[in-house]
Amino acid sequence: MATETWTPAPLPDLSGRTAVVTGASSGLGAVTARELARAGARVVLAVRDPAKGQAVADAIAGDTEVRALDLGDLASVRAFADTWSGTLDILVNNAGIMAVPQGRTTDGFELQIGTNHLGHFALTNLLLPHISDRIVTVSSGLARTGRIDLDDLNWQNRRYKPMGAYGQSKLANLLFTVELQRRLTEAGSPVRALSAHPGVAATDLDRHIGGLQGAAIRFAYRFIAQKQPEFGALPTLYAATQDLPGDSYVGPGGRSGRRPSVEKRTARDSDTALARRLWDRSEELTGVHYR
């Protein structure tokens, strides 16, 4: 009988394997990097602020390296990928921003779609020739609220809504996984694309949500959040290390939310036609194509 709580303690031996974790300088990414390193992997912390990343790496017992990566700047994404050599076993697309004020990336994309989706889209495709095992992209339960507007992904022709933009970017993460797995399967590749979401984990991701909405969310944390990032990272670690089929979507299961389980997909986040159209639009915007 399955226990109510799953911990990273029984992770398989990852000795000799290499993992990249984006956004590993805090929160869920830092926990993910720590646990993968504890299991024996060489872990590259891909972070926007190398000093913060190094502080996290210094506290990890294991083989780590810190490399600069700004997902809001395609030149930085290309530089990271161009300097990669050797096999990459596990790519964890973890970095993300939530409900930020309206702004633009270096390349002119709306900040949330640019960072959460387009940056990871480009990074994954550029690194794909090196990847041997799997790609795990971290989404959110709020993907269920998302709507994809292919004609206005960058919120240039509609009134900007921070949570609407976040939901769109997180839905994009799931559709990206759908289409990536389809392409991998079609090519006969053994690489698997999976996605995960942390549930309601108390990190600093919501720091930009102000007013009554922000106060309500932080009050609700007292009752429904998994409290520590350690618990929020469990679905990601499960997706990154367990023998799951491609396009699995892992979330927090069990009464406590501390036993990761594969979740049912909704019609919207498993829409293969929309996933293909989003992929094509993402290629147009980034100039990065499937290899």
Image: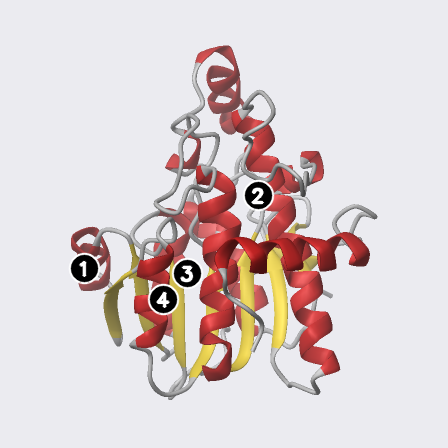
Q: Position of residue 129 (x, y in %)?
A: 49, 82
The CA distance from mark 1 to mark 4 is 22 Å
Residue 200 is situated, as x and y percent measured from the top left of the image, at 55, 38
Residue wearing tag 1: 54
Earlier in the chain: of badge 1 and badge 2, it is: 1
Residue holding disc 2: 169
Mark 2: few/some/many CA within 10 Å (<14, 14-19, 20+): many
Residue 32: mark in rendering: 3
Residue type at mark 4: give it: Arg
Give the SS element for disc 1.
helix
Give residue 215's position: percent from left, percent from top. Answer: 46, 16
The answer for how far apart the CA atoms under marks 4 and 2 are is: 21 Å
Q: Residue at x 34, y 45 (%)?
A: 106
Q: Which of marks 2 and 3 is nearer the N terminus?
A: 3
Res 193 label: none
User: Image quarter for residue 145?
Assistant: top right
The answer to which of marks 3 and 1 sits earlier in the sequence is: 3
